Image (cartoon, helix red, strand yellow):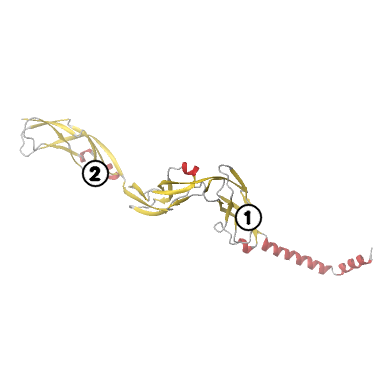
Amino acid sequence: MSKPFSKFWGNLRKEKWLMLFCFVLAFFAWQGIRRNLGFEVSVSDILVDVDVPEGVAVWEKSTHRVNILFRGSREDIRYLNNEQLRVVIPLPNPAYGEDINVKLSEKFLRNPTGAKVVRFSPSDVTVKLDHEGERLLPVKATINGTLPEGLEVDRIVCTPASVRVFGAQQVLDGMESIHTETIELKDRQATFKESIPVALPQAGRMQVDPDWVSVEFILEERSSVQSFENVEVKIMCASGEQRHFNIHPQTISVTVKGQQQRIEQMRSSDVFAFVSCSDLAENTGYDLPVVLDLPQDVQLVKTVPTVVHVDVEN
């Protein structure tokens, strides 16, 4: 064994405790570095956008949001969230109608922190482009929930009634209308109006003008329709009248509507049908309209027949 090596080995045996201390110190130093630089966190639902030239629109996109696994120091990752992150894919030279597959990489990510990307999920995005077009489409309200018992929507009025929509021509050609964000009906007690944003379709990158509309819901008490058969038609004549009045037909059918609870409580005896004979001077036959006397808040829908024949004789 050479003298230099023997000398080194001898010194190593003499300083073995120092060497052990150095190894332990290095181990804990590495653990500290690892704790500060080796954190990983996954952020979900990061928006994916496609940057295209003017006059070009996104027709289809295989995914609208991605999940990304990040690695970095505690300070880098502690404030990561999907609101501050965004994936933007530039396509400066578009090919219309073709599937364009893009492998996602960190260069597409707008990330204000120092955290590094470990992987994307999914790892790629397929995009199809089209010429940008525009259409004027009617607005329809999107509703959720049910009204309290006894109320119903009479009509819905959107102002403006139509908005201008910009996007891929292929998408616009398949649209008949555009909807608002969801409006809740639960606990509504009377007619109300709300300003609500227009909901943009997931297909492609679309814009609307204006992007907010006013929606008015006209509410009314829930109505019900009820028909009463064989309602007798009465004769209303002057006091002291001695002549005889023969009616044909003697009964009619009456259909009414009103608040559901009120209609459900009605009976045929609540419907009073009559013809007025007080002005009939001659003894002959008459075709007279049937008059209905109905309870308050009950409306007449129809009578069958509306006219009856009355013969007047001594």
Residue 179 % position (x, y) = 43, 47
Amino acid type at image mark 2: Val
Q: Which mark is residue 298?
A: 2
Label located before the other in sequence (2 or 1) = 1
Residue 288 versus residue 209: which sits nearer the camera?
209
Residue at disc 1, secondary structure: helix
Residue 212 versus residue 130: which sits nearer the camera?
130
Q: Which mark is residue 107?
A: 1
Q: How many marks?
A: 2
Image quarter in which the C terminus is found: top left
Residue at 71% from the left image edge and 63% from the top image edge: 31
Q: Is residue 148 left or right of residue 16?
A: left
User: Badge 1, how many Cα within 10 Å: few under 14, some, many 20+?
Assistant: few
Image quarter in which the N terminus is found: bottom right
Residue at disc 2, secondary structure: strand
Residue 154, compared with residue 115, is above or below; it is above
User: How far separated are the C-alphas under marks 2 and 1?
Assistant: 71 Å
Residue at 86% from the left image edge and 67% from the top image edge: 12
The quadrant where residue 222 appears? top left
Residue 278 versus residue 84: which sits nearer the camera?
84
